[in-house]
Image: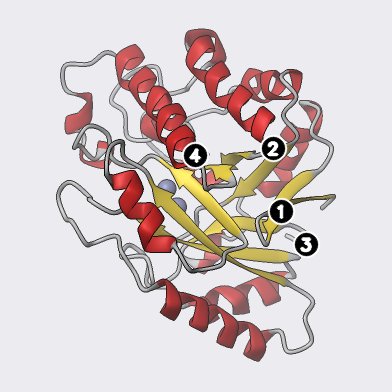
Amino acid sequence: MGKFIDTHTHSEFSPDSKTSVRELLEHAREAGLSGIAITDHLDLDAPRNPGLFEFSIASQQKAIAEAEKEIFPNGGCKVLKGIEIGLQPGESIQHSREYISGFEFDQIIASIHFVDGEDPYYGNYYDGKDFRRAYSRVLELIYTTAKDFGDYDVIGHFDYVARYAPYDVKDIRYADFPDELDAILKMLAQEGKALEINTKTYDFHGSHLQVLDQNILRRFKELGGEFVTLGSDSHESSRLCDKFAVFAQVCKSCGFERLTYFEKRDPVLYTP
Ligand SMILES: [Zn+2]
Ligand SMILES: [Zn+2]
């Protein structure tokens, strides 16, 4: 795995992971990673389970600092304090702002997990919608909620909604959603923020393996986009930096010679 930095990982501070921060860092050391960002879930106002996706940021940051001291006493691996905030429109955005205020992060990922009161993971979201409506609604929400929230560095897994979708069309293709995608990509380019390639999305073994449409990356470059992050979204240490070599090559071929990570909220370009 070598010199990669995994910018999207979950520890036991996320309700759907049992991996301790220590274990993540131990694996990072064994795999010789250049860096790792721990980005646990904060999804306030979750529709089925309010409170489930909340955690104590203070405890998480303390665990990160302690594990770093223990496992990398002489440095050698960038250990980055992150968070993945699931956004929903309306007052939930203000709740998120208040929840994180007073804390310092290296990187904040803005994601959409819940849509109009539904969790696509459970399937109901897709009822009565064709793929165009189901996907375009999420792309619109990514744009409007991120714009409204503002305090983020990276848009996480823009194509997450297709992961659990029941349609034949399992890819978000630029040609199908040029306006929705342009709005997101322009915003990221103009504000110096990053687009994430979430490698977990391309790892689902349903009827059709989801594919990243490289036209989206090319378009991002064309619009002046500079920053692309690679995130495994691993909830267990075995998936750290999964498929990064493949996607680093994809980035390169689309004009992104270097990858990005964030430190103290500033983008840093690096060559793996
Ligand atoms: Zn996510
Ligand atoms: Zn995640």
Which residue position is annotated with label 2? 192
Q: Examine the image and state in which quarter residue 3 appears.
A: bottom right
Q: Examine the image and state in which quarter residue 264 appears.
A: bottom right
Q: Is residue 37 visible?
A: yes
> Mark 1: which amino acid?
Asp
Which residue position is annotated with label 1? 266
Q: Is residue 12 visible?
A: no
Q: Nearer the viewer, mark 4 or mark 1?
A: 1
Q: Dot 1, crowdedness within 10 Å: few (<14), some or many (≥20)?
A: some
Q: Mark 4 or mark 3, which has the lower sequence index?
A: 3
| Label number found at residue 157 | 4
Q: Give x and y (percent) for residue 145.
A: 40, 35
| Label number found at residue 217 | none
In this rendered view, identify the residue nearer to me: 194 or 35. 194
Q: Secondary structure at mark 2?
A: loop
- Whether the residue under disc 4 has CB within 8 Å of ligand 1: yes
Q: Nearer the viewer, mark 3 or mark 1?
A: 1
Q: Secondary structure at mark 1?
A: strand
> Mark 4: which amino acid?
His
In this rendered view, identify the residue nearer to me: 183 or 73. 183
Q: Mark 2 or mark 4, which has the lower sequence index?
A: 4
Q: Is residue 54 above or below residue 67?
A: above
Q: Mark 2 or mark 3, which has the lower sequence index?
A: 3
The alpha-carbon separation of the residues under discs 2 and 4 comes to 18 Å
Q: Nearer the viewer, mark 2 or mark 4?
A: 2
The alpha-carbon separation of the residues under discs 3 and 1 comes to 23 Å
In the picture, the quarter occupied by the N terminus is bottom right
Q: Give x and y (percent) for residue 65.
A: 59, 82
> Mark 3: which amino acid?
Gly
Residue appearing at x 82%, y 42% in the figure? 258
Which residue position is annotated with label 3? 2
